Image (tube, helix red, strand yellow):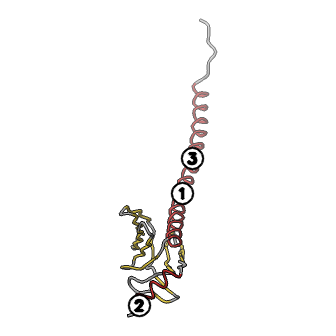
Amino acid sequence: MKKLPSYSIIELIVVMLIATIVIATAYQGYLMFFRQYLAFKERSEKIARVSLFDRLLTSDMEDSREARMRNASLHCIYPDKNILYEFRTNCIIRYQENLPDTFYMNAGTPVFYFNELPTLEGKLVDRLEFTVERDKDSIDFSYEKKYGADVLLNENENLIP
C-alpha cells in the first residue's frame, strides 16, 4: 500500500489555532472601529440638529416682519405665515402652518428683550437669549431682530391712548 502525502492532525490543529487568533484580532479591530464610527455618527447628528435649529431660528428672526413673545413662546410673523417656537425643558418645537418640527435639546428658560429690557406679553422682541445643555457643556444662544421704522411706529401708535 502506497502512503499519500498529507498533513498530520497536529499540523492542522496548529493552523486552526493560528487562524482563530488572526480572526479574533481582526474582529476586535473591526468592533473597535465600528463603535468609534457609531459614536462619531451620533455626535455628528446632534451637531447637525443644533445647527439646523440655529439656522432656522436665525432665518426666522431676521426675515419675519415681527417677532413677539406670547405665553413664553416666540411668534415670528410674516405677511403670509406665522411661525411659533415653543420652548420646553427637553425640546424646542417649531410650528410652521401647524406642522411641528421637534428639536430635542435641553433648553433653559428663554429671555425675551426689547430695547435692552425684558419684554412684556404680546410685545415686540428684538433679542432672544437662552442656554442649551448638551453633553456636560452649555451652549448660549442669542438672536437679534432689526425692525423697520414702519413696525416701530405702528407699535408706538398702539401705546398712545
Query: In this view of the protein, which residue sits in the foreground, 144 or 16?
Result: 144
Q: Say which residue label 1 marks.
A: 39
Q: Which residue is drawn at 44% across and 86% down?
A: 119
Secondary structure, mark 3, is helix
Q: Are marks 1 and 2 in contact (CB under 8 Å)?
A: no
Q: Name the residue under label 3.
A: 28
CA gap between label 1 and label 2 equals 54 Å
Which numbered disc flags the more N-terminal residue, 3 or 2? 3
| Residue at the image position 60 percent from the left and 23 percent from the top | 8
User: Badge 1 local density, few (<14 within 10 Å), some, or many (20+)?
Assistant: few
State which quarter of the image contains the C terminus: bottom left
Residue 91 in sight in this render: no
User: Which residue is farthest right?
Assistant: 5
Crowd around label 2: few <14 · some 14–19 · many ≥20 (10 Å): few
Query: Mark 2 = which residue?
Result: 159
Q: Is mark 2 on a helix, strand or loop?
A: helix
Of marks 1 and 2, which one's residue comes earlier in the chain? 1
The residue lying toward the viewer, choosing from 117 and 102, is 117
